[in-house]
Amino acid sequence: MLLSDSAFLRACRGERVPHVPVWFMRQAGRSLPEYRALREGVPMLESCTRAELVVEITMQPVRRYGVDAAILFSDIVVPLKAIGVDLDIVPGTGPVVAAPIRDLAAVGQLRELTPEDVPYVTEAIRGAVGELGATPLIGFAGAPFTLASYLIEGGPSKDHRLTKAMMYGEPDLWHALLGRLAKIAAVFLRVQAEAGASAVQLFDSWAGTLGRSDYEKYVRPHSQAVLEAVADLGVPRIHFGVGTGELLASMGAAGAEVVGVDWRVPLDEASKRIGPGRAVQGNLDPTLAFAPTAVMTARAGEVIDAGRHAPGHVFNLGHGVLPGTDPDQLARLVDFVHGYQPR
Ligand code: CP3
């Protein structure tokens, strides 16, 4: 079996597949006991800089579940840390930034990323690709809006109030910040694809907090710039956000081959909104892993049936695997997806 013929890459390209390919956002992580064992005593961001550890954690869900793709074990804030932003990932909280960005001087401090800033990423990808054989590896980056939210708020936020206040109130500062973040994200994706990643995913997790016209005015141009900057690499680009039902058409127009969809919009409807020629990824509600297996798999069948209406479908959850998810449930879900004969 050739890597380029894998079910995952075929689905991204909208080609016929032997089975619906499946992987899970956050498939490596706290729900796996073998992950918790390896991470014991190693802070999250430090673990991302140890290439052998990254390879091992990246491989864990592939071995356990037989998913159709691996995703590099890293984080969206890794490139920011690499250019000197003082930040940490606090367990149970998420990224916390010591000096939040509020003015042009702070934006000026965000220098460009170079491959030499993240040698451990190149090394880890080469190592993982060597072990994965015909299973594709997905590289990823945070989209400018989602990165900006952490940098401006100083940490996770429910309403993104400071972020949106800057966006509405200081548009020049806003565009300067997002322009810089777009360049950083583009380099981070390029490094990963050049080291051997077979696809890249741009996570704009929090873009769903915006209405369509604001998204198009303040955010999409920057995400589109990231996607365009890696278009020449010839790897499928996946573009994902949560709560983006109203933004799917706009996100489709940003240029990715595959648009990720959360659980709120069925994939047939999502595909209509996204428009022709683009595959979809998603979108089982991650909480269904906590329901009885038969309930979960029945809903997974509905997801696959709806996904048949799109030019291509990569099965995933509508967002990341929740901490506390039973890995055996996910193993049963993968088996179900692989064995499912769509109507
Ligand atoms: O398996 C994978 O999906 C690959 C690894 C991955 C991580 N973060 C590892 C991680 C990926 C793709 C990400 C992306 C990421 N990081 C996003 C976009 C995806 C999404 O979920 O919307 C965002 C918004 C972040 C920022 C971030 N980092 C959050 C919100 C958290 C969780 C905080 C918490 O503890 O609840 C992190 C930390 C993080 N990143 C963990 C992992 C496995 C947990 C750290 C731990 O194990 O202690």
Image (spheres, rainbow, N blue to C red):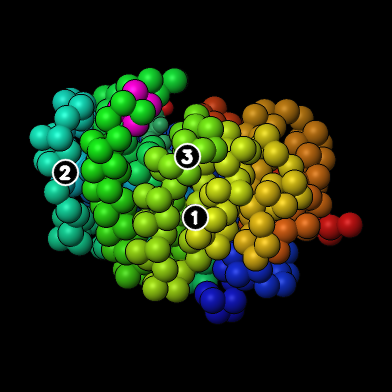
Q: Position of residue 49 (x, y in %)?
A: 23, 48
For mark 2, does the 10 Å Cα neighbourhood hold few (<14), some (14 to 19), or many (20 or more) residues?
some
Number of the label disc, if any, that sits on residue 9: none
Which disc is residue 254 wearing? 1
Lower position in the chain sequence, tag 3 or tag 2: 2
Query: If the picture is divided into quarters, which one holds ligand 1?
Result: top left
- Residue 291 at what x, y percent from top left? 73, 28
Q: Which residue is mark 3?
A: 215
Q: CA distance from mark 1 to mark 3?
A: 11 Å
Type of the residue with mark 1: Ala
Classify mark 1 as within 8 Å of ligand 1 or not, answering yes or no.
Answer: no
Residue 110 badge = 2
As drawn, 79 above or below 209? below
Question: Closer to the camera, 239 or 248?
Answer: 248
**SS assignment at label 2:** loop
Residue 69 x, y percent position in the rendering: 53, 59
Q: Which residues are magenta?
A: 163-167
Residue 245 appears in the picture as rendered: yes
Seen as rendered, the residue at the extreme right is 343
